[in-house]
Image (cartoon, rainbow, N blue to C red):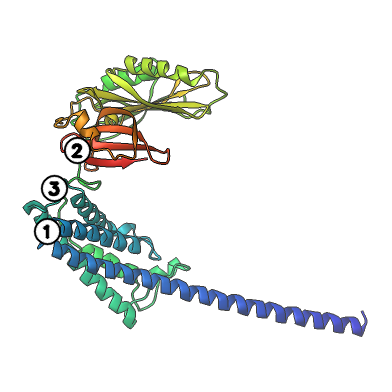
Amino acid sequence: MSVKAKRLIAIYTAAAVLALAALAWASWDRLAFYRRETGYASSRAFEEAANAAGELSLTLRALAYVTDDALGRRLCAQAAADARAAETALSVLPFATQELEQTQGYLNRCGDYAMSLVSQADGALGDEARTHLTELSGAAAALSGRLSELRALLSDGGAEMDSREKPLQNLTGGDTPKLSALLLDCEAHFDPPEAFAYEGVFSPRESPAPGTLSESETLKIAARAAGVEPRELKEERTAEGPEGRRCYSAGGLLVGVSARGLEFTAQSRLIGPASIGADEAPAVAERFLEENGFDGLRLDSAGDNGALAVLRYAPMQDGALRPDDGVTVSVALDDGSVYAFDAARYSAEPAPVTWETDLETARAKLPENVSVVSDRRVIRKSPGGTNRAQYEFICTGAEGETVRIYIDAATGRQSEIAF
């Protein structure tokens, strides 16, 4: 190789090294920038969580002194927003927050309870509500105080925000404690008020009364649903507790039976090309329901995707449909078999409701800019699980859209509007 060639190779090699060094420096600088931005965002999220908890404490404390219904509703809505803001801010911190179940559970329940007070019929806060709000306010004050202390530690350098990029450093860090560890300590000492029943999503629910089926009876029910002899079933799983749920399999079919009866069936096979029409599926579903002891159900809704027809059936009471207590039957359109069945929410027990408002009075509560397509009586569950007698009006809105308007049969007031 000539001297000139060697010189060119050396020059090109040096240029390549310099270019790579410059690129590495730029990448490192950009990475450092992203790290700083991430750290600022995490610190800002924790600051927002602390601020929201403080606002929640003040709002709940103010609610204990409210006498005006309009102000009470506004403060309840503000409390719900503060709780949601605190929970959301905590959830985006750069570490897993599953361990903070008491704190996040409290924030969820607090916000949900405040929203339930906003939607109550008379708008007034009774003595029971004030007692609950006072208890929630005390817990919010304790949480706010602890989060404020942690925020001060972060600002003074007495604690460090966890690293999203290097999670192992959060466990093996240096002398400065990580925020995640301090929050876990906060969780261990956090004492939320005991759960209480109210009309909301996070209200504790009473479990349905268990039945009295024996093991042989559950096996018989499962065999009938699978269309096989009991000896052909294989027990897959048995659950402890009052429900005593047992799961059996027969080929690719899984069947679940509890002390209340048949709960579900499911298949794992792929569905082939359709050989029957969706209009034939109701006959298949209703025959299955009759054979398995589900009597008195009426078709609520039906739909299909070309391979599977999904039909929902519900019990009737006082001429009203109870859609939240019904079952779902899915029929495979390739061979006309029941592909899946779900009766986890099924209940045949009568719902304790009253019809204080007649249909015409309920219709008068509809706005003038809709035209009624159909109406029916329904019994639906509130977010807290309470049965509500309602009139459902399916209407056409001002722009041609379909609107469902529900009128509470007990109060005669609009209770929900859905699209």
When asked about the image quadrant of residue 140, the answer is bottom left
**Residue hosting label 1:** 68
Give the residue at the far front of this rendering.
368
The answer to whether residue 102 is above or below residue 18 is above
Quick one: 202 or 216, which is closer to the camera?
A: 202
Rounded to the nearest angstrom, the CA distance separating label 1 from label 3 is 12 Å
Q: Position of residue 401 (x, y in %)?
A: 41, 38
Assess disc 3: are there few (<14), some (14-19) or many (≥20) residues with their C-alpha within 10 Å of its C-alpha.
few
Q: Which amino acid, by three-letter code, is at mark 2? A: Thr
Task: Judge left or right: residue 316 versus residue 400.
Answer: left
**Residue type at mark 1?**
Asp
Q: Is residue 47 left or right of residue 195?
A: right
Question: Could you tell me which secondary element the residue under label 3 belongs to?
Answer: loop
State which mark lies toward you, 3 or 2: 3
Q: Earlier in the sequence, mark 3 or mark 2?
A: 3
Q: Earlier in the sequence, mark 1 or mark 3?
A: 1
Q: Which type of secondary structure does the marked residue at label 1 adopt?
A: loop
User: Which quadrant would the C terminus be assigned to in this image?
Assistant: top left
Q: Is residue 270 visible?
A: yes
- Rounded to the nearest angstrom, the CA distance separating label 1 from label 2 is 27 Å
Task: Tell me the number on the disc at residue 122.
Answer: 3
Identify the residue shown where x is 66% and y is 80%.
Answer: 22
Asked if the residue under mark 2 is in contact with the one under mark 3, i.e. CB atoms within 8 Å, the reply is no
Q: Residues within 10 Å of mark 2 (few under 14, many from 20)?
A: some
Percent of width and height locating residue 193: 15, 57
Q: Position of residue 110 (x, y in %)?
A: 21, 56
State the image quarter where residue 60 is shown.
bottom left
Q: Which mark is residue 386?
A: 2
Image check: 124 left or right of 322?
Answer: left
